[in-house]
Image (spheres, rainbow, N blue to C red):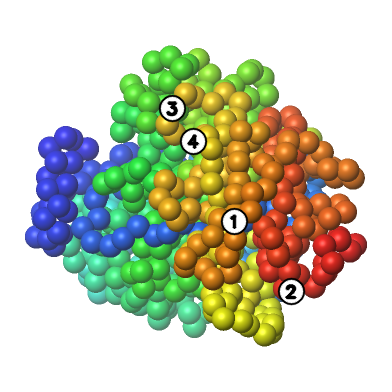
Amino acid sequence: MTTIVNYLTLICFASSIVSSCNVEVSLPRLPTHEREGAPRVKPSVGKLIPRLIPSSSASSPSPSPSSSSPSPPLSAVSSPTSKSVVCYYGSWSGYWTTSDQLPIENIDTSLCTHLIYTFAGLDSDSKIKSIDPSIDLDQPVGKAGYRRFNALKNSNPQLKTLIGIGGWNEGSLRYSSMASNYTARRIFASSVASFLETHKFDGIDLAWEYPSARGGSPQDKQSYVALLRDLVEVLKPKNYLITASVSANKLVIDSGYDVPKMAEYLDLINVLAFDFHGGWEGKTGHHSPLFGKSADQGLDSILNVNYTIHYWLEKGAPVNKLILGLATFGRSFAIKNPDDCFIGAKAFKPSHNDTNTPEIGSYGFNQICSMQRNAKWNIQRDSNLLAPFACKDNLFIGYDDRDSFALKSRYARVHGLAGIGIWSIENDDFTGKCFSEVKFPLIKSAVNELRGANTSIPVAKLPPTTSGSTNKPDNGLWSSTTDRPWSWTYSTAPTIHHQHTSSTPSTWWPQPSSTSSPSTWWPQPSSSLSTAWTSSTSNPYATSSTTTTAPSVGKPSGAVCKYPGTFIHPTDCRKFYRCVRISIEEKYKMYEYTCPPNTLFDVNSRNCLWDYLVNDCRDGKNRK
């Protein structure tokens, strides 16, 4: 994208007259992952969505994929109300060297509810086709990818397989032309039905990248809905699924998607919530941050998962159809020197990965964890982005690990989304070489969190109230920081290993804002941290100020850290402790905390709640 196009785009949005701007925006070419580039437009209207932080990255103190022992098998569908786990498989990985290939037969069918084979294409007659017969079709022509992929249902009859059609390399023009013509749409829909029946797929995932962009037409928004309607008419009588992989780019959402209408025809809407930042920007960044930084302005303020999900919801997407897409790959940058290991540092170009994937600047998590095992890396976590980045020499990589995957999965769960998507399954550590023979550690971490205990708590009957007590919630959870009976005050920002000396906090739990209303009540684990319970005019229950001791770094008697998360104190449920992994070799630090006055730690919500709401601990002693 040129500087001129950027400038014109910003001018258009600054004038708040988006529809009058006729600016063609070229999105970066991403051949390997076939995803869009960073959304690069400034919102003309709307507000930033307040952060809604899950209280921990582990939903329960049961064995998780971040423990040293392999996780037990997970049922793909544990109950009628289970969340969806949509896993993409990149068929082009069949060209990688043998040691780096994930054979289709080795896909763990217990992890995903839906598997999408990417990609099929569109021929000149508006019919679906195999893009690569040598990979997709049967011998002696090819490697029988379709047949082997659908044979996975033999080991899990509940698994649903879909064919993805489109992708970045397919472009937009041919889909725009087909969707704008009634006859072509009917030909396409009929060909899809025959294709699904022939190859035994359960449905189709439409990955048109993108309506009204990349040579498409301004009428694509309406044509897209018409295409979905025709697909429904042909496919639904045969009980085929229809899903769509959609952009996180605000400009594409506004110009290409009539969200309420398209949602009527789709079973699931898979939001590809990554590639927000990359080497095209000239500065380091994380390509899939959960939240933005409080200091973000302009474009940066919308380039995060939280904004994207809320924007889709604001545009009319049903929450029970929305899938949060997670990335098993990271994006790299070339930095001038190792001291530039921080977000926003000047970057000269993407760094080539020198591996199977041809895309410059892309690393699968299986590659990243192997590199970190074989050499010393400067690994940091950002308290706002809630994700790690790592540097070695002149290489900077922003990526997701098990902890950040679990956090995003919990984000999806507590927001009531339909589930999560995994782009893509072959980039996880499928051999178990990084974490004590645990295979697919990222996906297992996310799935365990997604299928964990519900964070909601049954409404309890309130005790008799006194004057000024109307702000106490009836479910033990606080809808805003002003309702909570406490706040946190910090003396200095905490530090962690390899902390860069900048104003950007680098501990991975959220940092309170500089305003009088903190953004989160979580304390930072640091010996330099001081906490104080303070009175608040907005909350009558905070009637006194009491100073407590800072969280201590140590090991509560009887407590053991086997995996990251927050856990009740072994002997006193007025206290809890947090296990924070500090290295890839399963090393942990433990931090002990004390709940505010008149509250106890609740093991279900993993929050400090009013004491009358914690049934297992009325007298301040932990009852096992």
Sequence-wise first label, 3 or 2: 3
Q: Amino acid at mark 1?
A: Ser
Sequence-wise first label, 3 or 1: 3
The residue that label 2 is drawn on is 612
Residue 320 vs 546, above or below: the answer is below
Q: Dot 1: what SS?
A: loop
Q: Dot 3: what SS?
A: loop
Question: What residue appears at the point 80 percent right and 73 percent down from the top-left corner?
Answer: 615
Q: Amino acid at mark 4?
A: Pro
Question: What residue appears at the point 75 percent right and 32 percent down from the top-left corner?
Answer: 587
Residues packed near mark 2 inside 10 Å, few (<14), some (14 to 19) or many (20 plus) = some
Dividing the image into 4 quarters, which one contains the N terminus?
top left
Task: Indicate which label's residue lies in the foreground, 3 or 2.
Answer: 2
The residue that label 4 is drawn on is 505
Q: Amino acid at mark 3?
A: Ser
Q: Nearer the viewer, residue 383 or 448?
A: 383
Q: Dot 2: what SS?
A: helix
Sequence-wise first label, 4 or 1: 4
Residues packed near mark 4 inside 10 Å, few (<14), some (14 to 19) or many (20 plus) = many
Q: Could you tell me if the residues under marks 3 and 4 are in contact, i.e. CB atoms within 8 Å?
A: no
Q: Is residue 371 left or right of residue 396?
A: right
Residue 153 vs 148, above or below: the answer is below
Q: Could you tell me if the residues under marks 3 and 1 are in contact, i.e. CB atoms within 8 Å?
A: no
Q: CA distance from mark 3 to mark 4?
A: 8 Å
Q: CA distance from mark 2 to mark 4?
A: 36 Å
Q: Position of residue 305 (x, y in %)?
A: 44, 52
Question: What residue appears at the point 67 percent right and 48 percent down from the top-left corner?
Answer: 548
**Disc on res. 502:** 3
Sequence-wise first label, 1 or 2: 1
